[in-house]
Amino acid sequence: MSKKILILNGSPRPKGNTASLCEAFIKGAEEQGHSVVQFNLNQLNIKGCLGCMQGHKQSKESPCVQKDDMQKIYPVYQEADIVVLASPMYYWNISGQLKTAFDRLFAAAELNENYENPHKDCYLIMAAEGNTADNWEPVLQNYRTLLKFLEWKNCGEILAGGVMNVGDIKGHFALDEAYKAGKAING
């Protein structure tokens, strides 16, 4: 059975290292017959969460009171089996673009009793300049804690260290890991 995959790409570089990792993942997933929708968040107009707690008063298709480009993401998110969080590492965390969009997904949780988030499988795809265990530790702790509280399944972490400039990813083993991760998704 085909899976519906949502990729939230928080990189501002449309042809950067994170984008290359996403392309490899998408290629593998599509070869297995899965459908993939990717949003390049830097190209969208997404405002920060207002913390207004009014999502329960909205519709499933448009749960947030703010009407911006999140309206394109919500329906795909609601239907997705898998969410891929893709980002360059910025100050030992995900990019602001990805954080802003992810915060806004809380409006979908507000539609459910007890603010329960829709259950998803999730991958982390990340490119970073540094490539040591202590470099990855803060972002991985944040990611794993997020999934724990959302009750999402961590399907994998594809980490490409040592890639600062656009194109540094060329020939990096993480491209193969991303492709294999997409290809390994079972229907």
Image: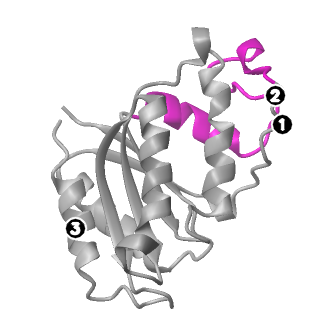
Q: What residue does disc 2 label? A: 65
Marks 2 and 3 close (CB-CB < 8 Å) = no
Residue placed at 46% from the left, 42% from the top?
145
Label 2 or label 3, whichever lies nearer to me, is 3
Magenta range is 53-80
Name the colouring of the figure. Answer: one colour
The tag earlier along the polypeptide, 2 or 3, is 2
Q: Position of residue 75 (x, y in %)?
A: 56, 31
Gap between marks 1 and 3 measured at Cα: 37 Å
**Up/down of 84 relative to 120, above or below:** below
- Residues packed near mark 2 inside 10 Å, few (<14), some (14 to 19) or many (20 plus): some
Residue placed at 35% from the left, 69% from the top?
159
Please indicate, yes or no, whether residue 112 appears anywhere in the rendered image.
Answer: no
Residue placed at 48% from the left, 31% from the top?
149
Q: Please state if 75 lies on the left or on the right of 120 as rendered.
A: right
Marks 1 and 2 close (CB-CB < 8 Å) = yes
Q: What residue does disc 1 label? A: 50
Q: Which mark is residue 172?
A: none
The tag earlier along the polypeptide, 1 or 2, is 1
**Up/down of 39 relative to 11, above or below:** above
Q: What residue does disc 3 label? A: 177
Q: Position of residue 13 (x, y in %)?
A: 58, 77
Q: Residue 163 colored magenta?
A: no
**Up/down of 169 relative to 152, above or below:** below
Going by the numbered disc 2, the residue's amino acid type is: Val
